[in-house]
């Protein structure tokens, strides 16, 4: 019998698409976009349409039994074992590490392999109880931006409601590429907006190509552009004095710097001409304007400073607190009022919190005094983390006991002592809170997982049992937690009803960000100058800094999201692989010519961290001095020694111990 059910895509993606699963009896016939869903409107993105009808449902490709390593670490040789056997041995090894070295010798790395609430947060209950060291999740992705915006606004995850676009006259997308990272935002939300679109990005990607104005600046020069804009705004009387007076502190301090940052100076620093800077300042200041600060923007050596400088623009122009205005980095649960602490249960923590940055993962895992056991779940560190060569050598340590939980035999899984098979989003119930649109969605079980695969929460309930952990929170059922989450919110819906509807929009009218003019900072205002920043060792105000241009012969390597991949997922899907083609680096014609490289040539990219050979593409989409190679390839399938993270030195950004991967510099030569 054929039937359909509604569910939600829980990938780390701005869109949060509604999904329709067509079932034929107890098997899935097709996975499609939900025509009734306001974002997906009947269509998944191309990569998910392929992967969810391909490798994600291919029982041969999916992990379906627990595996124990039977060859060298990294070789990928495993023997199936029962869950009981695997969990008993894992528990024994963990107890041994705790007794001999302390619980903090157990590290766990996790991120947003799935963004659904239970699968993302329930395992934290176990690690809190255990007292393990957490590899601080956001340091691989967006922590610099979070720290910067929290200092200024008191929050980094209460962004504008995208629905308020109907009242905006100008939208600035700064360092995000929706054409890859938010395909439905690119296709529908932007096309339906009457606001003029400004894109600020070193690459002329598809979203930049359809902008009314594409400001193609040099990477790492964004703070200079923001300061140049502030100079023009101040000079031309475009400040919103009343807003500054009522809602901000520290403008006088910032203004002293702004006086110096003339458009001529900013033009020199960014490569953008004076007329463009002046025109943009006017257009933005006049408003109503919305400002979207991308995650790519802050993956810079001085990404925190960039975010503070850009984040000052809405404050000084009063582009906040009214329809058609606002600033957005990410939307947390915000007005949707779901308290995810209920799921992660931080009160179970027994010892002070220990954490390390992803930037230090390779060093910590290489050091037996700091790491004896390693869990990797919702993440594929061997592909996504910096200093890939060093990290993979560390993962090969014989005396590091490691467990990887995934749907697939990833490159991280190849290094594990035990691989545990996880269920996919099609195989268990959960809740999804998309991080752009303010919707609330159900993830609904369509079929049983393949073989013996289990949803993350069930894996950690069983592991708690094997460890003899008796706290009731560690054994709570999924449904119990989902019901509690919804019951404690103001949404007035239970999971059963949400699951029937798929997605609800709790807000009939656009939510106006900061409508009450109050900010959760110490002063209750936007802190353009911040005593808290100073106390934490940062400058009080953002600075007019520009990264030095790469040295002679060097290029700045950007490795943003690919249209065809979702981070390190989907590279193992055959249809996706056909679209992807060989791993490539795109160079500006001048840079290719200077190195004697033509399209299709092989080129060796190298720096002090590593090297990688890629196929050359040539295009003026990239600026001279910039090279582009997307993230997310699986080197074992490409037959390469690594992916682009082989070149990523893991340098921390200026705030939050966070990734500055888009600051990577390389040399390139013909092979
Ligand atoms: N060079 C470069 N490197 C980067 C970046 C960059 O811009 N450039 N970006 C960084 C960023 S922003 C991020 S977020 C990271 C992401 O990097 P990763 O976290 O490594 O990548 P993902 O593909 O999101 O997810 C990892 C794994 O989660 C698994 N997974 C999916 N669902 C489940 C589930 O329900 N249970 C379990 N146990 N596993 C599941 C998937 O199969 C996948 O293997 O990469 C970072 N690395
Ligand atoms: N298809 C697809 N979608 C994804 C992902 C994916 O891998 N594939 N990953 C997901 C995840 S985990 C994340 S964090 C988001 C990330 O998505 P985005 O927030 O869009 O971030 P990135 O893809 O890293 O980079 C976006 C843009 O930043 C630009 N950029 C780099 N350096 C600079 C700079 O110095 N200044 C300026 N102005 N721009 C700069 C890059 O050229 C790029 O076009 O996407 C999510 N969505
Ligand atoms: S990855 Fe994003 S665009 Fe693709 S189906 Fe999922 S939510 Fe939609
Ligand atoms: Mo990310």
Image (spheres, helix red, strand yellow):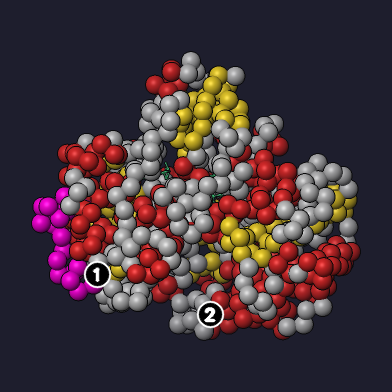
Rendered location of residue 38, percent (x, y):
42, 60
Q: Which one is in front in this view, the residue at disc 1 or the one at disc 2?
A: 1
Q: Can I make out residue 455 in this image? A: no
Q: From the viewer's side, name the closer residue of 611 and 32.
A: 611
Q: Can I make out residue 600 in this image? A: yes
Crowd tier of the residue under label 1, counting other residues whose Cα lies within 10 Å: few below 14, some 14–19, many 20 or above = many
487 lies left or right of 266: right
Rendered location of residue 102, percent (x, y):
76, 69
* Residue at which label 1 appears: 248
Say which residue appears at 70% left-offset and 67% top-offset. Answer: 104
Ligand 2 lies under 8 Å from the Cβ of mark 1: no
Mark carried by residue 486? 2
Magenta-drawn segment:
230-247
- Residue 646 higher or lower than 252, as above or below: above
Q: Quadrant of the N terminus?
A: bottom right
Say which residue appears at 66% left-offset and 65% top-offset. Answer: 133
Q: In which quarter of the image is residue 376?
A: bottom right
Type of secondary structure dominating the magenta stretch: helix
Rendered location of residue 423, percent (x, y):
71, 60
Q: In which quarter of the image is the C terminus?
A: top right
**Residue 235 belongs to the span the image colors magenta:** yes
């Amino acid at each position: 019998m054929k039937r359909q059910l509604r569910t939600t895509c829980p990938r780390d993606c701005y869109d949060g698409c509604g999904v329709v699963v067509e079932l034929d009896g107890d098997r899935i016939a097709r996975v499609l976009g939900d025509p009734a869903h306001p974002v997906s409107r009947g269509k998944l993105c191309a990569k998910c349409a392929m992967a969810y009808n391909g490798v994600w449902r291919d029982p041969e490709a999916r992990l379906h039994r627990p595996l124990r390593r039977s060859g060298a670490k990294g070789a990928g040789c495993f023997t199936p074992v029962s869950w009981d056997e695997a969990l008993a041995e894992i528990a024994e090894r963990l107890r041994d590490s705790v007794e001999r070295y302390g619980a903090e010798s157990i590290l766990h790395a996790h991120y947003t392999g799935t963004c659904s609430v239970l699968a993302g947060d329930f395992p934290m209950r176990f690690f809190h109880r255990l007292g393990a060291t957490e590899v601080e999740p956001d340091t691989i992705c967006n922590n610099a931006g979070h720290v910067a915006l929290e200092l200024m606004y008191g929050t980094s995850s209460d962004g504008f409601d995208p629905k308020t676009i109907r009242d905006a006259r100008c939208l600035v997308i700064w360092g995000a590429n929706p054409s890859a990272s938010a395909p439905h935002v690119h296709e529908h939300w932007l096309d339906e907006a009457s606001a003029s679109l400004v894109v600020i990005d070193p690459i002329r990607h598809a979203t930049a190509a359809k902008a009314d104005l594409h400001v193609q600046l040099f990477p790492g020069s964004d703070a200079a552009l923001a300061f140049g804009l502030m100079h023009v705004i101040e000079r031309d009387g475009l400040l919103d004095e009343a807003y500054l007076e009522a809602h901000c502190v520290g403008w006088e301090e910032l203004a002293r710097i702004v006086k110096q940052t003339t458009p001529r100076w900013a033009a020199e620093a960014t490569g953008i001409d004076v007329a463009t800077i002046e025109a943009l300042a006017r257009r933005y200041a006049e408003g109503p304007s919305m400002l979207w600060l991308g995650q790519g923007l802050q993956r810079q050596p001085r990404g925190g400073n960039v975010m503070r400088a850009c984040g000052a623009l809405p404050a000084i122009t009063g582009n906040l607190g009214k329809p058609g205005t606002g600033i957005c980095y990410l939307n947390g649960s915000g007005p949707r009022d779901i308290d995810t602490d209920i799921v992660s249960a931080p009160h179970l923590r027994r010892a002070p919190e220990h954490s390390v940055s992803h930037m230090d993962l390779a060093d910590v895992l290489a050091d037996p005094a700091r790491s004896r056991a390693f869990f990797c779940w919702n993440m594929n560190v061997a592909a996504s983390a910096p200093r890939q060569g060093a990290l993979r050598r560390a993962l090969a340590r014989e005396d590091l006991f490691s467990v990887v939980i995934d749907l697939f035999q990833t490159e991280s899984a190849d290094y594990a002592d035990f691989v545990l098979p996880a269920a996919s989003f099609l195989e268990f119930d959960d809740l999804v809170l998309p991080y752009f649109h303010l919707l609330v969605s159900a993830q609904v079980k369509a079929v049983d997982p393949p073989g013996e695969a289990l949803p993350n929460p069930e894996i950690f309930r069983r592991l708690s049992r094997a460890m003899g952990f008796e706290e009731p929170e560690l054994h709570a059922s999924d449904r119990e937690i989902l019901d509690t989450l919804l019951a404690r919110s103001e949404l007035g819906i239970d999971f059963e009803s949400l699951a029937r509807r798929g997605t609800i929009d709790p807000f009939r009218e656009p939510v106006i960000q900061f409508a009450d003019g109050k900010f959760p900072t110490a002063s209750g205002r936007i802190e353009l100058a911040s005593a808290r920043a100073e106390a934490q060792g940062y400058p009080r105000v953002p600075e007019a800094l520009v990264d030095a241009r790469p040295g002679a012969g060097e290029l700045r390597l950007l490795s943003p999201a690919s249209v065809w991949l979702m981070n390190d997922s989907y590279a193992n899907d055959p249809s996706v692989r056909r679209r992807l083609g060989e791993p490539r680096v795109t160079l500006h014609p001048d840079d290719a010519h200077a190195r004697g490289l033509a399209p299709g040539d092989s080129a060796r990219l190298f720096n002090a961290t590593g090297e990688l050979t890629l196929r050359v593409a040539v295009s003026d989409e990239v600026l001279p001095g910039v090279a582009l190679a997307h993230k997310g390839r699986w080197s074992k399938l490409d037959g390469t020694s690594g992916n682009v993270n082989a070149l990523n030195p893991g340098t921390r950004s200026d705030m939050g111990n966070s990734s500055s991967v888009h600051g990577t510099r390389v040399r390139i030569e013909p092979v």
